[in-house]
Every structure is written in C-alpha cells, then in structure tokens.
Image (tube, grey):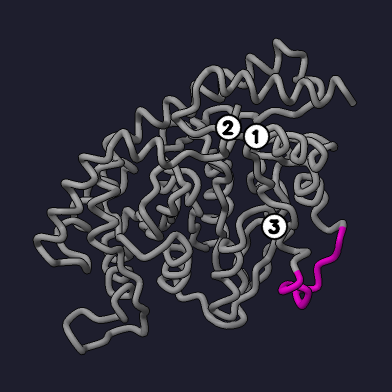
Amino acid sequence: MNVPLLDLKTQYASIKQDIQVALDKVCAEQSFILGTHVQNLEQTLASFIGTDHAIGVASGSDALLLSLMEVGIEPGDRVVTVPFTFFASAGVISRLHARPVFVDVMPDTFNLDPSRLADSFTSEVKAILPVHLFGQCADMESIVQIADEKGIPVIEDACQAIGAARNGVQAGAFGRTGCFSFFPSKNLGGFGDGGVITTRDPLVAERLQLLRVHGSRSEYHHHFIGMNSRLDALQAAILQVKFQHLAEWTAKRQAHAASYLKLFQTCGLDERVTVPVVSSGNTHVYNQFTIRTPRRDELSTYLTHHGIGNRIYYPVPLHLQECYQDLGYHKGDFPVSEQLSQEVLSLPIYPELTADQLQYVVDTIKSFFDCR
C-alpha cells in the first residue's frame, strides 16, 4: 500500500469544479492584484479568527517580516523566539539586522516554554515571537502576561495553526498580530505562496496595509519604506473556495489523530514511541502528527521502504545552523530542542486518509519494532 505524506491531488479532485469557477471569474475580470477577492478573503478570515482586521500578503514569511517592521524592529534590536521551528521564524528577524534570542521549548507540546522567558530579557529585547508549532497553540496567556509586564509586543507565528484555539481564543487573536501561511501543505493551502496577518488594532492594520505596498497610501506617494507583498486575487479566490471546507478537513485531521492514538495503544506502541500531547485548553488542528522515538532515522527509512511518506520537522535546531554561528550559541544550550531534533518524525495526517491507510501505517511501525 502507498500512503503519501500529503495527497493534494485527491483533495483537488473533490473541489475541482468550484475552483475552476473561481479562477474563471478572476480571469474574466482581469484584476489580479488585491481587489475584491482579496478583500472578501480578508473579511472571512478576520471573522473566523475573531479579530477585526486581516491583511493579505505574499507569504507567511512576509507576514512575520511585515509584523516586525510594523512594530519598528531595527538593527541591533533583539526578538525572542524558539530554536525548534521552521527557519522563517528567526530568518525574518535577521533580515532586519536584529538578533534572534532563543528560548527552549516544552518537551511535550514543542512550543515555547514560558518558564524560561525571564532569563532571555535584556533592554534590547523589543518583541516576542512565539510559534504555534504543528497546529497547537503555545501557552499564550503566560507569554502575553510576561510581555505586558515588560511592555513589549507579541507577534504570533501561527503559520501552521489556522483554526487552532486555546481556551476559546483562536490562534492569531492573542498578540498584536497573528501571522498565517497559505503554503500548499498547510491546512488551508493555496496554489502557491500566500499569507495573512490578523490584528484587532485598526492603526496596526492601516500601517500593515501601507507596508505591503511600498508604504504608499496613494499612488507614488510613500509614507513609509515598505515592500511589495500582496496576496494575489487568484490565490484569494482559491482560498475562499477551500475555506468552505476547512472545518470539515480539520475535523478529519482530528479524527485521524484520535485513530492513531487508539491504534498505537492497541498495538502496544505507546511504550515504544511518544505520541503527540495536547495541552489542557488547546484545540489541536494537526498540521502535522509528530511522534518521537530515539530510533527515528531507522524508522523513517523503514517507512519509506514500505511506501509510507514521512518527514523530519526539523533535523537541526536553529541555534546550531551554520548561518547562526555568529550568535554564539553552542550544542547543549537548548537541550529539549536538540533532543527533539533527533527524535521527531511526522506521519501522514491529511484529511483524505482512509482507515485502511491509517491501519497500515501503524501496523508497519509495529513490524519495525517487532523485528528489531
């Protein structure tokens, strides 16, 4: 049996007709930059997240970058984030010639450990950028409380967590801004790059709207030094169609996760691998279903040999990346992130998985441990 890590072709087949109608409408209008399709998506997402504003941009990375620009991050400033995440979380800080300050993560949720935040603060720290990794919110109540005490903004990296919530509050509604990605592999993915920034503050929204078009309020008059980061109308139209299915797709991801947990227990694998843990009060949307095992590399090879897609997110924590040697961090500085990078393995969790495929994945993992 073949079980890919992600099956976008099957998803597309189920909505192909609606997508084609949306694309034809944009093509007939010949209006591809911003416009009503982007505005409609922005309104949809602002309502869904529970913020008053959403600003469509060219990618999740740009959402993070523009959010840092909006709060005035300058060369020499420091921004706190985590070392166990996708590179963009720290890369956008460096692009502004600021300095990432890393704080280790929790071993169960993989998200920022608030108990370690206090040790990271200096007068140069100007923002906190927590990550909602794999589809589960960080402990935002604790993080926001600490940030408020320090008088610094929180920028949420929710690129993997659309629809996730914590104690009834959606990811992207806790901080000054929330940043989302529409990369094709995301739970709400486009046909290319795209992103959105959410905020409750109308002044923040206005500045972000200017920054995404070179800081211009009117043509050829520039109030800020911004950049070109606009969500295309074609992407917005596609995403508007796909959004209508997001709740159903999320429920299926959650059902698959529950099936995995039951199957792991039934097969006696819960003592061989560490399964995902959902923090109290959290609604997990499972952009990834990530297990842990000290024999990760062997298991990954075995699964691939048996036709099962899998991926290591992420094999090298950011503080040990070659490009960050100048930050002065060393192996052992963030032991949880370093251990996770050696043990994590993500399994197929996309909505279109069948019961037989789920069973095959777990049976194959069991056979790996039984014969070794």
Q: Residue at x 10, y 60 (%)?
A: 28
Give the spatial CA distance, label 1 vs label 3. 31 Å
User: Relative to the observer, which residue lies in front, 87 or 366?
Assistant: 366
SS of the residue at dot 1?
Answer: loop
Asked whether the residues under the numbered discs 1 and 2 touch, taking CB atoms below 8 Å apart as contact, a structural biologist would say: yes
**Mark number for residue 83?**
3
**Mark number for residue 235?**
none
Predominant secondary structure, magenta span: helix
Q: Of the residues shown, which amino acid type is indicated by label 3?
A: Pro
Q: Which residues are magenta?
A: 322-331
Give the spatial CA distance, label 1 vs label 2. 6 Å
Q: Earlier in the sequence, mark 3 or mark 2?
A: 2
User: Relative to the observer, which residue lies in front, 243 or 162?
Assistant: 243
How would you rate the neighbour count of disc 1 (Cα within 10 Å): few for under 14, some for 14-19, many for 20 or more?
Answer: some
How would you rate the neighbour count of disc 3 (Cα within 10 Å): few for under 14, some for 14-19, many for 20 or more?
Answer: many
Q: Is residue 123 above or below residue 59?
A: below
| The residue positioned farthest toward the top in the image shown | 266
Residue 209 location (% of width, % of height): 28, 69
Name the residue carrying label 2: 3
| The residue positioned farthest toward the bottom in the image shown | 220
Asked whether the residues under the numbered discs 3 and 2 touch, taking CB atoms below 8 Å apart as contact, a structural biologist would say: no
Name the residue carrying label 1: 307
| The residue positioned farthest toward the left in the image shown | 29
Magenta segment: does it hold 329? yes
Q: Earlier in the sequence, mark 1 or mark 2?
A: 2
Q: Of the residues shown, which amino acid type is indicated by label 1?
A: Gly
Q: Of the residues shown, which amino acid type is indicated by label 2?
A: Val
Image quarter of the N terminus? top right
Q: Is residue 218 above or below residue 194?
A: below
User: Relative to the observer, which residue lies in front, 204 or 290?
Assistant: 290
